[in-house]
Image (cartoon, helix red, strand yellow):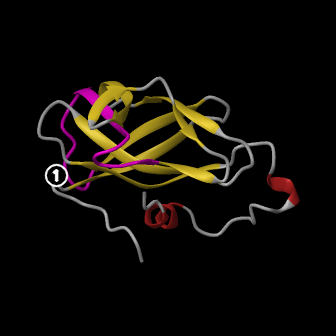
Amino acid sequence: MALTGALTLAGCGGSDPDSPGSGGEADLSVGSAYMPQPVSDMAAGFLVISNKGGAADQLTSVGSDAAGRVTVHETVDGAMQEADALDIPAHGSLVLESGGNHLMFEQLKQRPKQGQKVSVELRFAHSDPVTVEIPVKPATYTPKHGH
């Protein structure tokens, strides 16, 4: 799995993971977020959650005023299913991407258009919630990974 490109986009700068103060807690940041412009009352959301800390965490739920319900989905053997939580390893990342794990926005209150942003609150097992503004991209948008 080539996570390097997404990881590079997700977090810049920061501390040395081997420094003395980096153990014991998750240190989460979010990047590379986008939502393809929806064509129905459902939409998918993609992003990367990076953890520079020395402790693992889990994404447990997501909330947004833009939809009646937002769920976390995982893809297992090519089939999408709702997940109770997704792991964010210490000194690693959780990649939510097309064809893999992702956010599912159901019962959209209105269809966001390209150029708008959708606000979501990511909730974790151990860390404080993080609010992210997800930009709406064209329905055919594909992120560029790599350099």
Amino acid under disc 1: Ala
Of the pair 123 and 111, the residue shown nearer to us: 123
Of the pair 86 and 105, the residue shown nearer to us: 86
Q: Label 1: how many residues lie within 10 Å, few (<14), some (14-19) or many (20+)?
A: some
Report the quarter where the N terminus lies: bottom left
Percent coordinates x, y for residue 113 in the rendering: 19, 48
- What residue is drawn where x is 30% and y is 62%? 143
Percent coordinates x, y for residue 124 in the rendering: 58, 32
Q: Is residue 111 magenta?
A: yes
Q: Helix, strand or loop at disc 1?
A: loop
Percent coordinates x, y for residue 3 in the rendering: 46, 59
* Quarter of image, res 142: bottom left
- What residue is drawn where x is 17% and y is 42%? 38
Q: Which residues are magenta?
A: 95-116
Is residue 119 among what the camera can see? yes
- What residue is drawn where x is 81% and y is 49%? 23
Give the side of residue 14 with respect to residue 95, left or right: right
Give the side of residue 31 with respect to residue 101, left or right: right
Q: Is residue 142 magenta?
A: no
**17 to 47, vertically: above or below:** below
* Quarter of image, res 80: top left
Report the quarter where the C terminus lies: bottom left
Is residue 50 among what the camera can see? no
Most extreme residue toward the right, as rendered? 20
Which residue is tagged 1?
Answer: 139
Of the pair 117 and 15, the residue shown nearer to us: 15
**57 to 133, vertically: above or below:** above
- What residue is drawn where x is 23% and y is 28%? 109
* Quarter of image, res 73: top left
* Count of numbered badges drawn on the protein: 1
